[in-house]
Amino acid sequence: MASVTNKSFLAPSGFKILIDRKNFGSLEYTVQQATHGSVSLSPNEVMYRQTSIKEAGDTLDYSDVTFEIILEENLDNYKEIHNWLRRLVLQNTQSQSDRGSNPPNEVDISLMVLSSHNNTTNRIVYRDAFPTDLGVITFDAAVDGVQYATVPVTFSYSYFDVI
């Protein structure tokens, strides 16, 4: 059995998101929470003498990643994601030449895991990510104090690497 030599535990507040700044600059600085999805391996079932035996499957299923973003007063980050979603829907109706210099439909998103000294210890890179859900915004006139509006944004991706 391996012994634990590093007694420093991961603080869930130590993270930073990196995304294509040129096209999605408002999003990266307003992420307040990241929910890293799960990875599952579905077993294959093999019949043997009227009994089903499970063995390791041959594909990995990656669940989506969700970022909770704090909304800017002029909704720039909200509009970035909304426009991205609209582009994804419209891409099939446009020829390649009509798309011109639009931002990419899929990007790599990096979740930088930070140590207690704010140094990057690991990086989770979500490959070929694209938004699939722009959640609800709750407006509430009865909120006490200063609480800023947030919205969840969910991304699908091909796979992730931990670097």
Image (cartoon, rainbow, N blue to C red):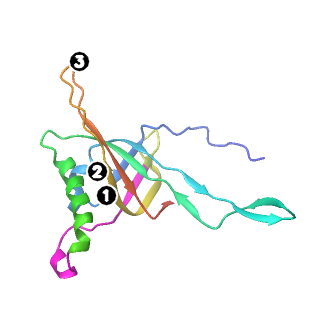
Nearest the camera: 163 or 96? 96
Type of the residue with mark 3: Asp
Type of the residue with mark 1: Ile
> Is residue 64 something that shows in the picture?
yes
Number of the label disc, if any, that sits on residue 19: 1
Q: Is residue 56 left or right of residue 61?
A: right
Q: Position of residue 130 (x, y in %)?
A: 34, 60
- At a point 59% along the width and 55% down the height, the residue shown is 40
Q: Give the CA distance from mark 2 to mark 1.
A: 6 Å
Please identify the quarter of the rendering in which residue 55 is found: bottom right
Badge 2 element:
helix
Residue at image mark 2: 28
Q: Position of residue 46 (x, y in %)?
A: 76, 65
For residue 107: magenta?
A: yes
> Is residue 100 something that shows in the picture?
no
Q: Which residues are magenta?
A: 94-112
Asked if residue 48 is positioned above or below residue 138 in the image, the reply reads below
Q: Give the CA distance from mark 1 to mark 3.
A: 33 Å
Asked if residue 41 is positioned above or below residue 31 in the image, the reply reads below
Badge 3 element:
loop
- At a point 19% along the width and 57% down the height, the residue shown is 83
Badge 1 element:
loop
Query: Who comes first in sequence, dot 1 or dot 3?
Result: 1
Please identify the quarter of the rendering in which residue 156 is found: bottom left
Total numbered badges shown on the rendered structure: 3
Number of the label disc, if any, that sits on residue 144: 3
Q: Label 1 near label 2: C-beta < 8 Å?
A: yes
Type of the residue with mark 2: Glu
